[in-house]
Image (cartoon, helix red, strand yellow):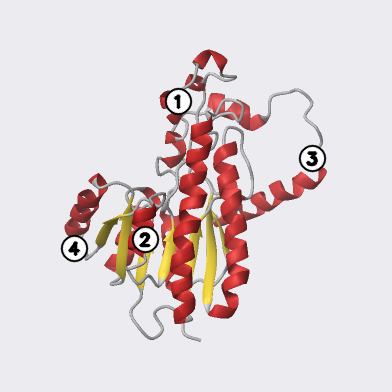
Amino acid sequence: MRTPDSQTRSTYLITGAGSGFGREISLRLAEQGHDVIAGVEIIAQVNTLRAEARDRGVELRVEKLDVTDEGDRAKALDWGVDVLLNNAGISEGGATVDLPAEVIRRQFEVNVFGPVLLTQGIAKQMVAKKAGRIVFMSSVAGLTVDPFTGAYAGSKHAVEAFADALDQELAEYGVTVATINPGPFLTGFNDSMFEEWKSWNDDPATRLYDYNELAFPHEQFDPEEVITTSIDVLTGKDAMYRHVLPVNSVEDVRAQLDVEWSRALTDGTRPELVQTAYDIDPYTPVADTPAAE
């Protein structure tokens, strides 16, 4: 069975490449000599990323690709994609009872509907070639849930369902599917989600929480592990389906999932992670210890 890179040079499409994981993954793949298309959400990011690629001495094709834009998705079908990383995503933190309707809808449009609709067309092209690889940048939030992340976690749980279904549906056609599930990594993404409330179009007096007092409730890891693992998955060096990162947090995530089977009703006290959101400073890195999140 032919796989990407086995007979012909593959084309990699990375969505959400304007910042964070997607940006660095695109540049690293290009540095390795791969044909990479970096999809960015807005035109302003195109020249910025092209300039960085020039500074690093790599050839990188940068295209405007807003996954929620039907025209942009249609345009991507002409690019001959062999390996797709659905990395584009957003997050806005807030209590479930406080999140404005448009904020909830937007998270699902960007994190779920856009990537799935983009994947549909590209996946059928892969099926026709009997080869291809589709990778979803999911999250530990696709498996577990923290306070103030209900909308984001809900969207990532949906991503997990679509990815799992695709993995089963495309198997006989030579197309593989994988997920990457980062925990808290220090890219700015997690902290900015606790800043988005400042642009809500609502009445602050109706909010249950004062978001001036809250921050992302975890210490955060260096993103290098996500970047290197993602590249191994995309290039086929890693053949596993799921990748919970950091690796030393896997057992903790499994334990959190197991607890759900014996979870009792709350007793009226504030949960530990809610208190942590009050106590922790933004952009807090993990201390130099081997402890997991």
Q: Label 2 crowding class (10 Å Cα cut-off): few <14, some 14-19, many 20+?
A: some
- Using the rendered image of the protein, determine whether residue 149 is visible from the camera's viewpoint: yes
Residue 220, position as x, y percentages in the image = 48, 42
- Residue at which label 2 appears: 74
Q: Counting residues from the N terminus, which is met first, the one under dot 2 or under dot 1?
A: 2
Q: Counting residues from the N terminus, which is met first, the one under dot 4 or under dot 1?
A: 4
**Does the CB distance between marks 3 and 1 fall below 8 Å?**
no
- The answer to which of 197 and 227 lies nearer the viewer is 197
Q: How many marks?
A: 4
- For mark 4, give the secondary structure: loop
* Residue occupying the point 18% across, 63% down: 57
Say which amino acid is labelled 3: Arg
Residue 48, position as x, y percentages in the image = 22, 49
Above-or-below relation of 160 to 190: below
Q: Which residue is at the far top? A: 205
Q: Which mark is residue 200?
A: 1
User: Disc 3 or disc 2, which is closer to the eye?
Assistant: 2
**Does the CB distance between marks 4 and 1 fall below 8 Å?**
no
- For mark 3, give the secondary structure: loop
Residue 13 is drawn in which quadrant? bottom left
Q: Counting residues from the N terminus, which is met first, the one under dot 2 or under dot 4?
A: 4
Q: Counting residues from the N terminus, which is met first, the one under dot 3 or under dot 2?
A: 2
**Does the CB distance between marks 2 and 4 fall below 8 Å?**
no
Above-or-below relation of 188 to 20: above
User: Disc 2 or disc 1, which is closer to the eye?
Assistant: 2
Say which amino acid is labelled 2: Ala
User: Disc 4 or disc 1, which is closer to the eye?
Assistant: 1
